[in-house]
Image (cartoon, rainbow, N blue to C red):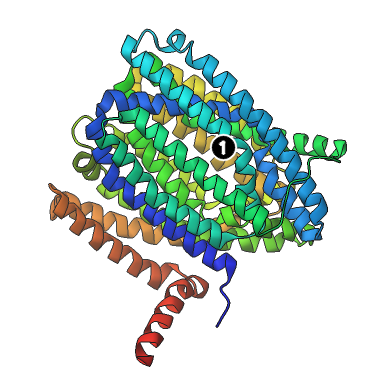
Amino acid sequence: MKKLNPLRTGVVLSYINLLIGNLIPFFYTPIMLRILGQEEYGLYTIANSVVSYLSLLNFGIGSSIIRYIAAYRAEGNQEEERRLLGLFVTIYSIIGILIIVVGTTLAFNIEIFYGNTLSAEEVNTLRILIILLSISMGLVMPLNVFASLIMAHEKYILSGIVRIVSSLLSPILNLVVLFLGWRSIGLVASSSALSIGVNVIYCIYAISRLKLIPIFKGWSGKLLKEILYYSFFHFLASIVDMLYWNTDKLLLGAMVGTVAVAVYNIGAMFHTYTQSIATSISSVLMPRVTKMFVDQVDSSAYTELFIRVGRMQYLLVGFIVSAFCIFGQQFIMLWSGPGYEQAYWVAILVLLPSVVPWIQNTGLQILTAQNMHKFRSIVYFFIALLNVVLTYLWIKTNGIIGAAAASGVAYIIGQGFVMNWYYWKKIGIDIPKFWKVIAKMFFYTIAVSAVWFVITHTIFVISNIWEFLVGAVLYSISYFIVAYRFMMNDYEKDFIRKPLSTIRNKFLKK
């Protein structure tokens, strides 16, 4: 029997998980919105945004786990790998305790920030949500080390299967607690239990199958110092992510109210879904990129990987973003119900500028492997500060749309222009060649989108869910026909031809 290729299988499982994880919410989220209502959904969103800031207390150390463990694994040094594992578990246990303490303290003083826009009952509910989320995050912190360990050992099949099962269980548990009447508190409790369970599985596998039992002694002070230095700039990157995607919601909650947060989050949700798809390939490349760095390959090898992965990411991202531009407005009206109309423009304003960093996400893996992410972190930090200032100013004049526009402008400056210059001039990646390749693909995306934009505004105007489904299916078929004929190369076509050939051969044998 032919042995499965772990990397290729891992990518396939990642896409299966993404398909499940992105399809299920489209059926589940409308039910949740109608049970919770805009106010409590906004409250639930604020609680998650507040607690997300507590993850900054890991000071970016999590980013170094895969990099350093993968390096020791490449050297075959299991003793140091176990010692490093013990170090990370200890650090994360301390961080977990710190998160619980800080989160609980913040919860009991939350009315300082939201007392003017939330009712007393809403403040009390928000307090409970923050406490539960803080405890969950604190408990999961040391277990997260084992999840990273699994990825460093390239156990993509195990990781993929566990994530698929988790994606299936999550909405089921959430719907159970919602129908039991536990509302937002029940959602937090069910998601916390599932998160802890998944990470316990990784822990058991690492210890029982990989035989990687942590060693809690003999740590190198020099190594710890190196890890902290390496992690500091990832810490800045984490601050950037928080400033980009959580500050908007916190400011909207404090300045406008829970309904504005609910609408904004629905728009931002489409950004989250697309990002998970765009980064699914590059997320499994870190061990391989680290090995490339250890082997001291030249810049042309990085350019080839950068373009190959970028092309595959664009094929999906281009399809999703173009489809949303054409059908998104009708979809949101049919899906979420009245009151969420502005979510479409929120999504457009944050989706379009994000296409560039999404199709270039391999660059982050290359920077991380080479320990050259310092510049990126600093640039993103200052651009994120600009985003916060613009968000605060533009919320006053344009509300939800102003907050989304501020994020989009900051993305264009930092992740578009500045980082492309850095990849080209400092890392040696052939960025002009990359954009020549993408430009050819982009032309066909625009052509298909323009035709369908005219069709949906003249011949086939969508007014119900069945018309939407028909339009979406026909657009998908037309896009992938054009993509297969004009955009894909032989390597990309093999991802379609080989599985179809295998299935056909099995049927012919029967």
Can you identify the residue that label 1 sits on? 140
Q: Residues within 10 Å of mark 1 (few under 14, many from 20)?
A: many
Q: Is residue 495 visible?
A: yes
Give the quadrant of the C terminus: bottom left
| Res. 446 image quadrant | bottom left
State the residue at coordinates (19%, 52%): 468
Q: Is residue 406 left or right of residue 459?
A: right
> Looking at the image, which residue is at 55% across and 45% down?
199
Q: Position of residue 294 (x, y in %)?
A: 79, 58
The image shows residue 173 at horizontal and vertical percentages of 35, 43
- The image position of residue 107, as x and y in percent, is 48, 16
* Amino acid residing under circle 1: Val
- Front residue (pair 400, 503): 503
SS category of the residue bearing label 1: helix
Measuring 16% from the left and 50% from the top, which residue is drawn there?
465
Furthest residue to the bottom?
A: 509
Percent x, y of residue 85: 73, 45
Is residue 400 in view from this perspective?
no
